[in-house]
Image: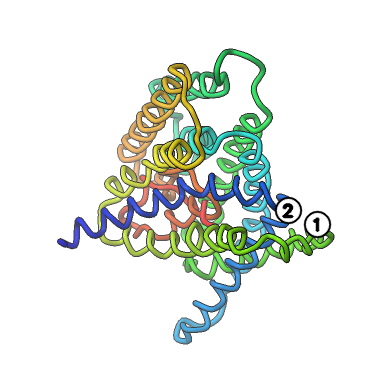
């Protein structure tokens, strides 16, 4: 297989894994308390990251910036995941993946490092399309009060946008290694959820092989593997191409939900899904073009190309070389 096609395949696999994470989280929270799922996911990810670091003895220890920045980002990332995981437990996996993609159009509204002078009106039109899409997705089989899970996912998108903007602000012009930053964040998350989950950790002994498989999938594949694969891939392709392929995540989330969880889309929710994908792609392309035409001094760090679980947003930013900045987002990863 040619190298370009191999790289595209890896990026699509990352998008598929991230898209499937919503169904995996939904399945895990069906047999375990949410806080236990979060602690287990963080702890398993931290163990894996520490294992990878143990094999890398040439790069030295953590720098002051990696520790000083990783701790607050670990806190904001934990806030994203706790709202997101509670949300996915109360809505469909398809809706969760589509609504969280609002992060793509919310983040540029909060971040001013890459586009001084404000975004063009067409960007706000794209954001309006996305908001209308959320309303259609929340309507389900008919217009009614939004479900709790849909509102929580909307809140998770807002919090994630704040987190992504914060990542961009704190990491710009600093030499921070992605794996080191990720490890700090997973350790912080493990510490934050240990005490709240401690009273119910005994439930882990009764979930069986299937339950542990879901937790390992969330930690090792949706977090650690996706981060490493994405880092490898984005260094071998253009940022625009990586953005396009990683931006298919909500499509995969919907497909996985329909195929494996039995999610059903009515014509109204199907229209909402199509509008969400179209609106996020439109808004992303407008923001990217606006950033590319900004004065050199106004250009900041990369911005989100996809919506994701743990650290995926900031990992994209850290993985992209400096000359590719201005198209992708900071983390998601776990």
Image quadrant containing the N terminus: bottom left
Residue underneath mark 1: 196
Q: Is residue 64 placed above or below 319 in the rendered structure?
A: below
Outermost residue toward the left in this view? 2
Q: Position of residue 232 (x, y in %)?
A: 34, 64
Residue drawn at 78 percent across, 58 percent down? 197
Outermost residue toward the right in this view? 199
Q: Is residue 107 visible?
A: no
Q: Is 275 situated left or right of 138 in this image? A: left
Residue drawn at 46 percent across, 50 percent down? 18
Answer few, some or many: residues within 10 Å of disc 2's Cα (few below 14, many 20 plus, some between 14 and 19): many
Q: Position of residue 92 (x, y in %)?
A: 56, 34
Q: Is 177 situated left or right of 33 in this image? A: left
Residue drawn at 61 percent across, 34 percent down? 91
Sequence-wise first label, 1 or 2: 2
Per the image, label 1 sits on a secondary structure element best described as helix
Q: Is residue 123 visible?
A: yes
Q: Is residue 292 placed above or below 136 in the rendered structure?
A: below
Residue underneath mark 2: 35
| Front residue (pair 71, 90) | 90
Residue drawn at 66 percent across, 48 percent down? 29
Occupied quadrant, residue 195 = bottom right
Circles 1 and 2, Cβ within 8 Å, touching? The answer is yes
Answer few, some or many: residues within 10 Å of disc 1's Cα (few below 14, many 20 plus, some between 14 and 19): few
Q: Position of residue 188 (x, y in %)?
A: 68, 64
Image quadrant containing the C terminus: bottom right
């Amino acid at each position: 297989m040619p190298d370009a096609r191999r790289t595209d395949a890896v990026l699509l696999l990352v998008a598929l894994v991230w898209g499937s994470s919503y169904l995996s989280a939904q399945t895990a929270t069906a047999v375990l308390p949410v806080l236990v799922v979060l602690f287990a996911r963080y702890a398993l990810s931290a163990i894996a990251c520490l294992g990878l670091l143990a094999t890398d003895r040439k790069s030295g220890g953590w720098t002051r910036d990696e520790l000083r920045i990783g701790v607050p980002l670990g806190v904001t990332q934990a806030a994203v995941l706790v709202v997101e995981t509670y949300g996915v437990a109360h809505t469909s996996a398809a809706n969760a993946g589509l609504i969280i993609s609002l992060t793509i159009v919310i983040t540029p509204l909060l971040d001013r490092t890459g586009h001084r002078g404000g975004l063009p009106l067409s960007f706000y039109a794209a954001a309006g399309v996305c908001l209308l899409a959320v309303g259609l997705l929340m309507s389900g089989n008919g217009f009614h009060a939004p479900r709790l899970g849909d509102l929580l996912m909307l809140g998770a998108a807002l919090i994630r946008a704040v987190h992504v903007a914060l990542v961009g602000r704190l990491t710009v012009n600093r030499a921070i290694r992605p794996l080191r930053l990720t490890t700090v964040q997973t350790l912080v998350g493990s510490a934050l959820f240990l005490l709240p989950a401690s009273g119910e950790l005994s439930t882990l002994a009764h979930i069986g092989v299937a339950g542990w498989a879901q937790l390992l999938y969330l930690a090792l594949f949706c977090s650690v593997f996706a981060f490493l694969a994405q880092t490898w891939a984005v260094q071998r392709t253009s940022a625009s191409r990586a953005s396009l392929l990683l931006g298919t995540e909500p499509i995969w989330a919907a497909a996985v939900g329909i195929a494996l969880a039995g999610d059903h889309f009515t014509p109204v929710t199907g229209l909402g899904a199509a509008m969400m994908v179209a609106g996020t792609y439109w808004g992303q392309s407008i923001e990217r073009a606006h950033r590319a035409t900004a004065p050199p001094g106004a250009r900041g760090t990369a911005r989100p190309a996809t919506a994701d679980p743990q650290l995926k947003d900031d990992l994209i930013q850290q993985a992209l070389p400096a000359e590719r900045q201005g198209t992708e987002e900071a983390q998601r990863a776990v």
